[in-house]
Amino acid sequence: MIRRAPRSPFTGKTLPVALATLLLAACATQPSPQPGAVVMAPPEEAAGPTLPPVPQPEERPVAPVSVTDPAIPQAQREAAFVEYASSTYGVPADTIRATLAQAVYQQKIVDAMNRPAEAVRPWRDYRPIFINDARISGGRQFYLENRDALERVAAQTGVPAEYIVAIVGVETSYGKITGNYRVLDALYTLAFSYPKRAPFFAGELAQLFGLAKAEPQLDIPALKGSYAGAMGMGQFMPSSYRLWAKDGDGDGRRDLLDHKPDVFASIANYFVLHGWQRGAPVAARAQRTPGAPDFVPAGDPKSLEPRYTLAALAQRGYVPMAGQPVPAPPASQGATVIGLEGDAGREDWIVYRNFYVISRYNRSPMYSLAVHQLAQAIRAGVPAQ
């Protein structure tokens, strides 16, 4: 899936004393370093207690070693894959074998996997890709053209319509760019020729056969998508499609390629299943106390889990700027801190549970912030109804 966001002005005012005092009495946060992102760090022993993790769906299965061990000859691994996919998803082995025979190795897919966008540019360069006049105006037009369907899903799920639109905007430029790779080729290439992540991609290739069994209108060799095998307007991987897609209009099938009612319902369902909270904030620009040490979460320095209270963050010198959103009450959910290199230097952000949920779509903090800022810009230009 894809990632980016618009630009908004922030003041440098300090948080009102009453709110700062309240924050000191209740909360917790964590950041996420990643290529292009700078996160901040006190000594781990001073990080303070953390909150429980956000409940998540079960992990999607990965393929066994017999399929993914590069020391095993590929023909043997492919035979093990056929057995695994057939026994796991109830698809005839002959069907799987015949479909795999149509797959073509693509070196350019491996090359693309080795140069993800987030790894080569900081936030100041990443952001304009998605937060620009064309993407914002396109999002507003898309929202207005699909307003009834979007707001129906938003009312049902609590996921604001502008965030659904922003995902589609960041992922596929509102359905214009959904990918030109055959999904079969992408997953086959990565399952058998990309050892670093072969267990995941071989698992996704198996899920593709399970998906086609559940949605027989899908013709596996004809499916097009990204170089990683993601499909449709929302760029769902086969497992996400099979497990979490929704039939948005009750026509008896789930079509995430270009059927908007299903696309909207499925993106919202993905967020809900990963812990989205209705009406809760996503992110707040942070005021950092001069001299405050960089914040890095205990344990995994790349974690975006919102496991710190706002009070704990305030003790470390990070509070939301005046006018920025906070949970109501402030102790009601956790947060964490991320630091990014913006046009004017470092930007510190306090990010909440719903930010973490967006990051389940794509693990880059820049992606999540881009989606958030694009959603805000879209909403600002859509008149109330």
Image (cartoon, grey):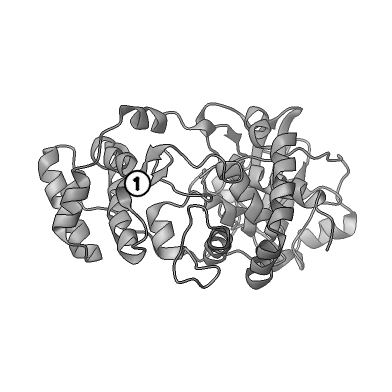
Image-quadrant location for residue 145: bottom right
Image-quadrant location for residue 62: bottom left
Q: Nearer the viewer, residue 324 or 181?
A: 181
Left/right of residue 292 with respect to residue 35 in the rendered view: right
Residue 250 placed where, x, y %? 52, 73
Image-quadrant location for residue 171: top right
Dot 1, how many residues are within 10 Å of its Cα: few (below 14), some (14-19), or many (20+)?
few
Residue 162 placed where, x, y %? 70, 55
On screen, residue 225 above or below 19:
above
Asked whether residue 315 is in view, the answer is no
Q: Which residue is mark 1?
A: 222
Residue at 49% from the left image edge and 71% from the top image edge: 251
Residue at 83% from the left image edge and 40% from the top image edge: 10
Q: Nearer the viewer, residue 160 or 261?
A: 261
Residue at 69% from the left image edge and 39% from the top image edge: 135
Quadrant in which the C terminus appears: bottom right
Label tally: 1
Residue 365 placed where, x, y %? 59, 43
Residue at 53% from the left image edge and 62% from the top image edge: 262
Residue 324 placed where, x, y %? 81, 51
Left/right of residue 46 with respect to residue 327 in the rendered view: left
Left/right of residue 221 with respect to residue 125 in the rendered view: left
Amino acid carrying label 1: it is Ala
Where disc 1 sits, the SS reads helix
